Image: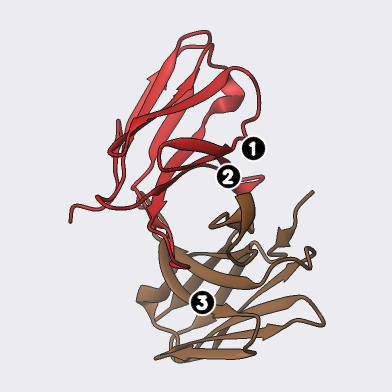
Amino acid sequence: DAGVIQSPRHEVTEMGQEVTLRCKPISGHDYLFWYRQTMMRGLELLIYFNNNVPIDDSGMPEDRFSAKMPNASFSTLKIQPSEPRDSAVYFCASHDRGFDTQYFGPGTRLTVL
Amino acid sequence: DQQVKQNSPSLSVQEGRISILNCVYTNSMFDYFLWYKKYPAEGPTFLISISSIKDKNEDGRFTVFLNKSAKHLSLHIVPSQPGDSAVYFCAASPLAGGTSYGKLTFGQGTILTVHP
């Protein structure tokens, strides 16, 4: 398996622009997670899905952030409008049912100027 | 409110010596604990885990210790190798059930540097 795939790997944008991050989980995994990593707060869970349904979005910082999972093999995290404080590395992770570890993608480094 | 904390941002050790990384948590509902390792430009990868029914789990050079009464978790690496240099995250989760299933809360990470 190719593992969790994220795109783009790097994104540089200007304040106010819309940003869309993409994730393809490992085939067969029914949980998908979006995290944000910053120096100050480490790894923060933003939202997670089970069987394509959002279960917990309490970590989404503001209404500017939204996430969707239209099918089992694709999810997006959108920031609109983006702000400089959104600059961070965003990770997607997946795991299957059973108390197993989560498998992380390589991350998207977002820079908002 | 940081429910999982790694109070040491960095740790430096000599090759061959023991590395000890520490983690504390506040949520008594946590029952499952993990350590992840992260290299630059890569996602975190699972290293070792422990459930609350145990106080120790070993996997090769890596041992995780859990002290539930103190709400303290530690990772021991013996002997340390230069390839172990990475950021280490501890994470915690409640056991299966309800909407918290599978939800991990991570610490801020500790940068480990192992010098040759």
Q: Amino acid at mark 3?
A: Ser
The chosen color scheme is by chain
Q: Mark 3 highlights which residue?
A: B49
* Image-based side of B100 in relation to A31, left or right: right
Q: Is residue A88 above or below residue B3?
A: above
Q: Amino acid at mark 1?
A: Gly
Q: Secondary structure at mark 2?
A: strand
> The residue marked by circle 1 belongs to what chain?
A
What is the CA distance from the residue labelled 3 to the residue labelled 1? 24 Å
Q: Residue at x 64, y 59 (%)?
A: B107
Quarter of the image for the C terminus of chain B: give it.
Answer: bottom left
Q: Mark 1 highlights which residue?
A: A59
Q: Amino acid at mark 2?
A: Leu
Q: Is residue B4 above or below residue B64?
A: above
- Are both tags, 2 and 3, on one chain? no
Q: Position of residue A19 (x, y in %)?
A: 42, 18
Q: Nearer the viewer, residue A4 or A109?
A: A4
Mark 2 touches mark 1? (CB < 8 Å): yes
Q: Is residue B8 above or below residue A51?
A: below
Can residue B72 be seen in the rendering of this structure?
yes
Q: Position of residue A83 (x, y in %)?
A: 57, 17
> The residue marked by circle 3 belongs to what chain?
B
Query: What chain is the red one?
Result: A
Q: Residue at x 66, y 72 (%)?
A: B31
Q: Mark 2 highlights which residue?
A: A45
What is the CA distance from the residue labelled 2 to the residue labelled 3? 19 Å
Q: Is residue B103 above or below residue A34?
A: below
Give the mark nearest the N terminus, 2 or 1: 2
Can residue B20 be seen in the rendering of this structure?
no
Query: What chain is the brown one?
Result: B
